[in-house]
Image (cartoon, rainbow, N blue to C red):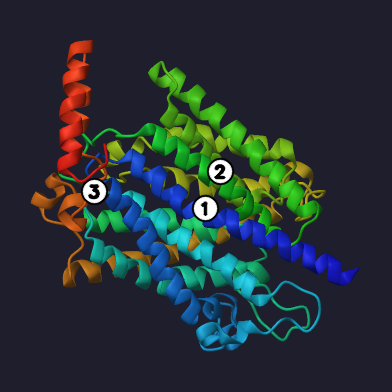
Amino acid sequence: MTEAIAAANAAWILAAFAAVSLMVPGLAMFYGGMVSIKNTLNMAMMTFGAFAVVGVLWIIFGYSAVLGDSLGGIGLLGDPLEFFGSSQLLTAPAEPALPPALVSGFQMLFACITVALISGAVADRMKFGAWMLFAGVWATLVYFPVAHWVFAFDSADGSVVGGWIANNLKAIDFAGGTAVHVNAGIAALALVLVLGKRSVFPNAPRPHNLPLTVLGAGILFFGWFGFNGGSALAAGNSASVVILNTVAAAAAGICAWLLVEKFREGRSTSLGAASGLIAALVGITPACGAVAPIGALAIGAICGAVCCFAVSLKYRFGVDDSLDVVGIHLVGGILGTVLIGLLADPDAPNAAAGLFYGGGVDVLWRQTVAVLAVFAYTFVVTLLIATVIGKTMGLRVTEEHELEGLDTATHGESAYIMETVVIASKVTTPEEAVEAAETITASAARAGVAE
C-alpha cells in the first residue's frame, strides 16, 4: 500500500510538472500579445532565454543551492556543491517517496518562470544579451537564496537544515508568493529604475494581439493548477483543496477587475479579464493551502480590485513598468502573503489560524516579516546587478533599434508579414478585398510563405 501511494504521488507530480512546463509558452504568448507588433518575438525570446539559462544553472548548482543542506546551518543558502551537477539525483530513494529527480525538475520550472516574469517590465528596450546575463546572475544571487529561505524545510531527523523563513520564522508560503511573485515584482521595479523609460512613455503602444494575450492567460491558468496543486507534493486532500481555492480565487479576481474597470472607465475589457485572472492567481499562490474557499474568493477579489488600481500608478510615479509586473506580481504577491495572517483557516491544509479565525496576530506578523525581508534583499541586490551590467556591457538598445523594433533589430525576424497587416487593415469594400487578396498572395510569395 505504501508503494502504491508513493507511485500515485509521483504520478501526480509528473502531471503537475507537465502542466507547469506549459507556463513557459503561456507566458511568452501572454506577454507577446501585449507588446507592439514589432516586439512580439523578442518577448518570446526573453521568456525562453530565461528558461534556458536558469535551467542550465539549476542542473549545475541551483538545486543544491536551493534544497541542499544550509551552509553553516543558518538558513541563508544551501550548499551549492552538495549536489553539484545533479548526478546524485539518479538514485531512487531508499524507501517509497518522491524521486529527488522529480522534485528537482518541478522546482526548476519555478526558478525559470520567476526569472521570466521580470522580462515583462523591460519590454521594448533591453538588450537581449544583457537580459540573458541578468537572468543568470539574478537567479544565482537572488532567486536561489530566497527560494532556499522559503522552500527548503528541515529534514525530519534534523540531518538537513533548510531556510530561515520556512523553519525559523515559520511564515506560510504554499507555492511561492514571496519566492516567486514578490521576488520577481520587486526585481522588476529595481531593474526598471536602472534601465529607464521607453522613448514613447507614457504613450506606450497598445497591445497588438489581445486574443494571443487571452490565450496565454488561459494556458497560464492551466499551468497554475500544477504550480499550486503540485506544491502539495502528494495526490490527496491537500492538493484538492489547493486546486479548489485556486479556481475560486481566479473567478473572483476576474469579476473584481472588470467591475473596477467598468466604474472607472465605463467598460470592461478582455485585457482586464486576463489581468484580473493573473492578479488573483498571484494572490492565491501563497495562500492556497491556508484558507477556506470563501477566503480564496476574498483574496481573489481583493487582488483583482487593488491590482487594477495599482497598474495605473506607474504613470503617476513615472516608472515605465511596461507590462505591469510590479502592479500585478509585486502588489498581488504582497496582498496574498499578508492576507494569510487575516484569513488563514485552521481546518485548511496549513492548519494555521489567522486573525479573523481566532489566531491573533501571530501569523500576520510572520507573513509581514517574510515579505519585508524578501523585498529588501531582492531590491538591493537587483539594483546592484543592474547597475553593474549597465555600466559594463550596457542594458539598453539604441534609440534607433528601439524605434525599429527588437524583432528585426535584434533577432532579424518578424512575427508578421507587415505589408499584409497594413493592406488588410485598409479593406472596406468587396472590390478592395479582391485586390488586397492578390497583393497579399504576392507578398507572401516574396516572403517564402505558402499561398
Dot 3 crowding, Cα within 10 Å, few <14, some 14–19, many 20+ = many
Which label number is shown at residue 124? 3
**Would residue 429 be seen by someone viewing this image from the given angle?**
no
SS of the residue under disc 1: loop
Q: Residue at x 60, y 60 (%)?
A: 17
Q: Image quarter for residue 316?
A: top left
Give the Cα distance between marks 1 and 2: 10 Å
Above or below: residue 101 compared with residue 297: below
Provide the residue designation for mark 1.
22
Relative to 22, 343 lies left or right: right
Q: Residue at x 41, y 21 (%)?
A: 264
SS of the residue under disc 3: loop
Above or below: residue 375 compared with residue 277: below
Across and down, in percent, residue 258 comes to: 49, 25
Which label number is shown at residue 114? none
Screen quadrant of the C terminus:
top left
Dot 2 crowding, Cα within 10 Å, few <14, some 14–19, many 20+ = many
Relative to 1, 331 lies left or right: left
Q: Residue at x 50, y 29 (%)?
A: 257
Across and down, in percent, residue 406 comes to: 20, 51
SS of the residue under disc 2: helix
Q: Residue at x 52, y 49 (%)?
A: 334
Provide the residue designation for mark 2.
221
Dot 1 crowding, Cα within 10 Å, few <14, some 14–19, many 20+ = some
Mark positioned earlier in the residue sequence (3 or 1): 1
Q: Amino acid at mark 2?
A: Phe
Give the Cα distance between marks 2 and 3: 25 Å
Q: Amino acid at mark 3?
A: Asp
Give the Cα distance between marks 3 and 1: 24 Å
The outermost residue toward the right is 1
Across and down, in percent, residue 66 comes to: 55, 75
